[in-house]
Image (cartoon, helix red, strand yellow):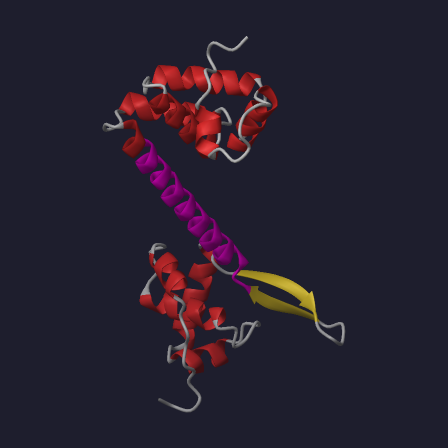
């Protein structure tokens, strides 16, 4: 490699996310150049030398990347107060961050469905998932939904209708998580052994018959 050319470092997540954006190889190379922060200002000659692309290719790719909003130009003042135009990939980084966050959320939600199904005892139907998603949309946490399912199993009534009633009762009492449920039972059961297991405290209780 020519001594004027640069070696690029590409993180896996950057590679995966940029490949989803239907870039040409040359566009990807130019984007990679700025991701490595060799120059924050756009100098076509330097970019061309570092990437082994022609100046015309660099100009075309840079224009395409700006059109796709993967690159923006932000005017800033240097130490001498001179206005300079700096290249920014903030739009791209923001998209990557949001994509990764969404992926983690989807994986977490899939784990929740798997846990619910495993404790429910049979495969969830489309209608089952619709009701569960309605609980989540209503503000019930995954933790408290699984807690209501666990109580339904404990009482031998593992139906979504029963779980829905338990959640409704817990919401009426202002419970946000299972700790709130446990604290309520402690207040109502002063004679209960404080060393008793948490699950027994929470689920050995008839919520639907409570006044």
Res. 93 visible in picture: yes
Quadrant of residue 24 within the rendered picture: bottom left
Quarter occupied by the C terminus: top right
Q: Is residue 200 above or below residue 14?
A: above
Residue at the image point whose x is 23% and y is 29% from the top: 123
Residue closer to the observer: 173 or 41: 173
Name the outermost residue toward the right: 81
The quadrant holding residue 61 is: bottom left
Check residue 92 for magenta coloring.
yes
Please give the name of the residue rendered at 40% of the width and 30% of the height, measured from the top-left corner.
Answer: 146
Horizontal side of residue 27 vs 122, given as left or right: right
Q: How many marks?
A: 0
Q: Residue at x 42, y 85 (%)?
A: 5
Image coords of residue 207 (percent x, y): 48, 15
Look at the image and tell me in which quarter the N terminus lies. bottom left
Q: Is 88 drawn above or below residue 177 in the view shown? A: below
Residue sitting nearer the eye, 84 or 103: 103
How far across and down, in percent of the image, does residue 193 sit? 53, 30
Q: Is residue 199 above or below residue 19?
A: above
Range shown magenta: 88-116
The residue positioned 42% from the left and 69% from the top of the image is 32
| Front residue (pair 163, 44) | 163
Question: Can the viewer see residue 175 in this picture?
Answer: no
């Amino acid at each position: 490699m020519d001594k004027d050319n640069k070696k690029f470092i590409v993180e896996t997540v950057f590679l995966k996310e940029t490949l989803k954006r239907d870039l040409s190889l040359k566009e990807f190379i130019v984007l990679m150049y700025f991701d490595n922060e060799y120059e924050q200002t756009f100098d076509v000659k330097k970019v061309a030398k570092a990437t082994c692309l022609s100046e015309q290719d660099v100009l075309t790719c840079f224009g395409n990347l700006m059109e796709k909003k993967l690159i923006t130009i932000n005017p800033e003042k240097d130490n001498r107060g001179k206005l300079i135009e700096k290249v920014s990939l903030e739009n791209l980084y923001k998209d990557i961050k949001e994509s990764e966050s969404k992926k983690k959320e989807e994986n977490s939600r899939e784990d929740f469905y798997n846990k619910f199904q495993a404790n429910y005892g049979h495969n969830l139907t489309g209608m089952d998932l619709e009701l569960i998603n309605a609980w989540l949309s209503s503000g019930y946490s995954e933790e408290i939904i699984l807690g209501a399912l666990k109580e339904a199993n404990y009482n031998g009534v593992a139906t979504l209708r029963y779980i829905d009633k338990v959640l409704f009762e817990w919401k009426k009492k202002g419970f946000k998580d299972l700790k709130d449920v446990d604290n309520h039972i402690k207040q109502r059961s002063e004679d209960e052994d404080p060393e008793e297991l948490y699950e027994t405290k929470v689920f050995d209780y008839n919520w639907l018959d409570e006044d």
